[in-house]
């Protein structure tokens, strides 16, 4: 009986020592674990359209896992990254939404084929300049159309006009 009591007390002592050791070491391990706050990022997305237009979108992202963040922008090209800021760019194989409503191909005063939002005139700023053409080689009708602006509302119309005018490039 004395041996049984001694065995039970010995087992209790071993159990208490193991529990104390476990409690002490778990607090040591807990102190080594670092907790990070979610990363706050300003994300700038630039879409570059074939007609030269660029749309820019600004977003604020809370990043919990970087692999999820990178996966969300898999189709984009990383252009710039610094603390708290990321810039992505994507080439879009289409004309811009604004050009679908009000896009024109025209000519600048110095003979450069360009895209415009609205009809080209002396105050209109070109969106994108493409190539120089020899104005003397143009038929007067085509020259007049380019001065007034040739509207385009689809990618196909845009490509058709640019291809036809390329034949007059110098």
Image (cartoon, rainbow, N blue to C red):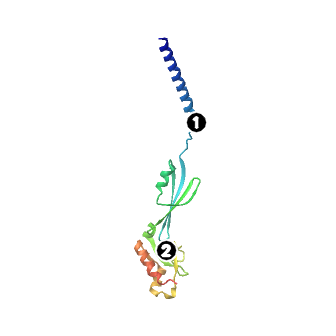
Q: Is residue 153 visible?
A: no
Q: Name the residue rendered at 47%, 76% in the picture.
A: 105
**Marks 1, 2: nearer the viewer:** 1
Work out whether residue 103 or residue 122 is closer to the camera in this orientation and state it: 103
Q: Position of residue 93 (x, y in %)?
A: 44, 68
Left or right: 32 with respect to 48? right
- Residue at position x 49%, y 11% in the image: 2
The single residue placed furthest to the top in the displayed view is 1
* Disc 2 target residue: 115
Residue drawn at the location 47% of the way across and 54% of the way down? 71
Q: Nearer the viewer, residue 71 or 104?
A: 71
Residue 166 rendering spot, x and y as whole percentages: 47, 81
Which residue corresponds to the image point at 46% horizontal and 55% vertical from the top-left? 72
Sequence order check: which comes first, mark 1 or mark 2?
A: 1
Disc 1 and disc 2 in contact, CB within 8 angstroms: no
- Label 1, label 2: how far apart the Cα atoms are: 62 Å
Q: Which residue is mark 1?
A: 31
Q: Residue 24, can we see it?
A: yes
Q: Is residue 165 above or below residue 65?
A: below
Q: Looking at this rendering, what residue extends furthest in the front direction?
A: 3
Q: Along the line of sight, which residue is nearer the eye, 37 or 133?
A: 37
**Neighbour tally class for label 1: few under 14, some 14-19, many 20 plus, Cα within 10 Å:** few
How busy is the neighbourhood of tag 2: few (under 14 within 10 Å), some, or many (20 plus)? Answer: many
Q: Is residue 98 left or right of residue 81?
A: left
Residue 41 disc label: none
Q: Nearer the viewer, residue 11 or 117?
A: 11
């Amino acid at each position: 009986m004395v041996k049984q009591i001694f065995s039970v007390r010995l087992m209790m002592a071993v159990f208490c020592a193991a529990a104390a050791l476990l409690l002490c070491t778990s607090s040591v391990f807990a102190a080594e674990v670092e907790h990070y706050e979610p990363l706050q990022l300003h994300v700038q997305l630039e879409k570059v359209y074939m007609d030269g237009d660029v749309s820019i979108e600004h977003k604020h992202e809370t990043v919990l896992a970087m692999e999820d963040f990178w996966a969300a922008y898999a189709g984009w090209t990383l252009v710039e990254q610094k603390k708290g800021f990321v810039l992505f760019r994507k080439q879009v194989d289409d004309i811009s939404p604004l050009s679908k409503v009000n896009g024109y191909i025209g000519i600048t005063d110095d003979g450069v084929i360009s895209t415009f939002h609205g009809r080209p005139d002396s105050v209109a700023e070109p969106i994108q300049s493409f190539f120089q053409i020899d104005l003397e080689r143009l038929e007067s009708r085509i020259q007049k159309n380019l001065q007034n602006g040739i509207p385009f509302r689809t990618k196909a119309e845009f490509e058709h006009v640019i291809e036809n005018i390329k034949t007059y490039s110098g």
